[in-house]
Image: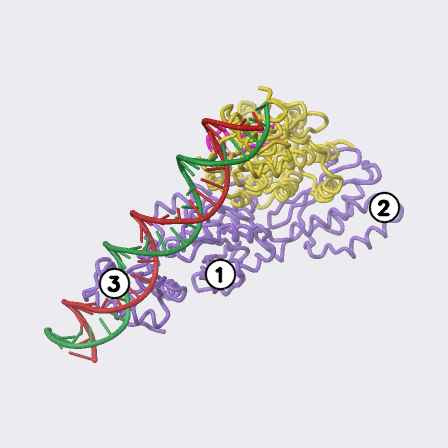
Chain colours: A purple, B yellow, C green, D red
Amino acid sequence: MQLSERKEKILAAIVEWYIATGEPVGSKTLLEYSRIPVSSATIRNEMAELDRLGFIEQPHTSAGRIPSQMGYRYYVDRLMNRYELPINEKRLIEARLSDSGGEPQQILEQAGQVLAELTNCAVVSTTPTDENAVIRRVELVPLGTHTAMMVMLSSSGILKSRVCRTDSELNLELIETFYNIVSKHFIGKSASEVSIALIQTLALSLGSKSLAISPLLVTLSDLAQLTEQTQLLLQGQSNLLHHNDYPNAYEIMEFLRRGEPLTNLFAGHKTENNTNVLIGKENFYRELQDSSLIYSHYSIGGKDSGALGLIGPTRIDYARLIPSLKYLTEIVGSIMSDTLED
Amino acid sequence: MQLSERKEKILAAIVEWYIATGEPVGSKTLLEYSRIPVSSATIRNEMAELDRLGFIEQPHTSAGRIPSQMGYRYYVDRLMNRYELPINEKRLIEARLSDSGGEPQQILEQAGQVLAELTNCAVVSTTPTDENAVIRRVELVPLGTHTAMMVMLSSSGILKSRVCRTDSELNLELIETFYNIVSKHFIGKSASEVSIALIQTLALSLGSKSLAISPLLVTLSDLAQLTEQTQLLLQGQSNLLHHNDYPNAYEIMEFLRRGEPLTNLFAGHKTENNTNVLIGKENFYRELQDSSLIYSHYSIGGKDSGALGLIGPTRIDYARLIPSLKYLTEIVGSIMSDTLED
DNA sequence: GTTAGCACTCTAATAATGAGAGTGCTAAAC
DNA sequence: GTTTAGCACTCTCATTATTAGAGTGCTAAC
């Protein structure tokens, strides 16, 4: 639906004022703030119309208007000033991200922290998925006579480790056998190829050594799984407590902590500029239906690999947050790309 | 100060009732609950005395009494029923901890989560420190022509990684040189011996290769530092929002998140049973002075190496939480010990 | 030392009141 | 046809008054 220019001006003013102050806006306040050259009565008429159309609503009869979720939607899609992030903010972000260790997870953690500080929202991010990733290296370091630490590095730069306990003594011969199997059957394979079936077949083919080596292979398969799984990182959850009129903080924190299905959170359609906004009821999960989720995919080597998201109340400064998130996602993508290939 | 037996009974009843219900206790309620064979008037007299002595206080004139911090202290030290954890709770804890990966950090994360669920408190834990720890293994895995991932494993089982970027091409020769240096000068050394001075001396002694190898050595030194640093893990912070009459949740969450000086948090004296309780103002940090901190050290191979702590309001079920925490710390210690030596 | 009884205090809940903000509608003006 | 001034109306929120009830401390008797 296309609103008249004047209605758009009024709606934008209502949204911006309400985002800034948190107070419902009346026709008189609006008159001063929006500098539209008409009387408050005219504005009242327009507001009544916007109300009827569903873009704004009244908390109660004698209060001003606040944007409805539909109002926010219209604002975000058509009215919002999509400004470029100022150069000094860009610099700030770059500076904060330059020195962050290198593993995808470390980079995301750093980025998430910056984002949390910048936006006062909770930050959710997913580690990169890469269906072409393969096992690059496996190390087995003995810790005691029956325990060892196994470390797996994937071609996408993900490092995982686990301690493994063997029944028989972990002697050099066993370790060598293990390395042989690994380099013959696992290096260069994708994690999903490390199936239980393969492990069992392999173990059986080893005859007498089978029993000794199978705990190692099981751990290997666990690690392959871990490497493949996208993980969810959470940060800045305490920011949710900042906002007034937003009593769901605890519920959302718990929902995020459970984290079960959240990988789907970012599964929506790609918009032209790679930043999605889900407002209130537009969210699939009940727990988020009073919140807004803004997310953006980062890409490694030109391919979408994961995403960063912001969660806050629907009354949130979209015009400021979206560019920040967008820029940060770009940086994250480029750092990760740099790390993996020169 | 030693209270009369009757005063002790009354104080214990007040503390327990208040912990259970959150309501101030009056003399009449107390009469029913505590089953002390005197009239309410006598109890009133005793309560007035306890008030004068500072063990209990009145929120306002016409309310019942609640324990003062001093009252809690007396209760924890002398009145509380230090019961053994029931066997099924023990089993539960063991079951939840049996399968947790093996790295100290993973074990602590698991333990922290269990503890958070069990206690409804925020959980703080420190990764093990071990001044005898030495560098056990270093791996350098090329990722691109100018980047590599370096992984360091310490004898105490701590694994850290970083991505390293070199100016000159990362060829086989360079890698071999690096490994030679590592095995000659670093393996078996403690992290604190990896000083900047040593790095510089080494780099210089390499003459022409110096420039090429120094980024690797710098990363090595970073990793050594990381390995040595005790880290702070936080969990269950959202639990702080559960409690009523505890408006500090946000402040405490922020304090914990900053985490700067928290390693000192657990520096207190060891009590006979290895569980410390700091109530309210007894805490050093201002942010915790309306809270209680309960912590307990875990020991690896008989040596105190780190600690787990609980943070919640002063009105907290000490008698239940202390045994849970204590048992969990023991388990954590024994799992970690098992991992490192058979 | 213990207890019954009672006057006293303070809180928390409920109700009553009024100011103020903002609206929608009507009728006049542009 | 659109805009505006004016006004009656509605509803919230803050303030004040009132009251019931819980709990105490004190006194005097046991």
- Tag 2 or tag 1, which sits nearer the N-term? 2
User: Does A278 sit above or below residue B217?
Assistant: below
The answer to which quarter of the image holds residue B42 is top right
Question: Residue B134 location, x and y as percent?
Answer: 66, 27
Residue assigned mark 1: A289
Range drawn in magenta: B276-295
Q: Is residue B291 magenta?
A: yes
- Work out whether residue B214 can be spotted: no
Question: Residue B207 location, x and y as percent?
Answer: 55, 27
Residue assigned mark 3: A27
Give a yes or no on whether discs 3 and 2 share a subunit. Answer: yes
Q: Is residue A109 magenta?
A: no
Distance from disc 3 to disc 1, alpha carbons, whole Å, reads 29 Å
Q: Residue at point 81% right, 52% down?
A: A202
Name the residue at the top extreme: B1
Chain bearing tag 1 is A
- Work out whether residue B35 can be spotted: yes
Mark 1 crowd level (few <14, some 14–19, many ≥20, 10 Å Cα): some
The answer to which quarter of the image holds residue B266 is top right
From the image, state whether disc 3 or disc 1 is nearer to you: 3
Question: Residue B54 location, x and y as percent?
Answer: 50, 25
From the image, state whether disc 3 or disc 2 is nearer to you: 3
Quarter of the picture holding the C terminus of chain B:
top right
**What amino acid is at disc 3?**
Ser
**What amino acid is at disc 2?**
Leu
Q: Nearer the viewer, residue A229 or B178?
A: A229
Distance from disc 3 to disc 2, alpha carbons, whole Å, reads 80 Å
Residue assigned mark 2: A211
Asked which secondary structure carries label 1, the reply is loop
Asked which secondary structure carries label 2, the reply is helix
Circle 1/circle 2 CB separation < 8 Å = no
**What amino acid is at disc 1?**
Gln
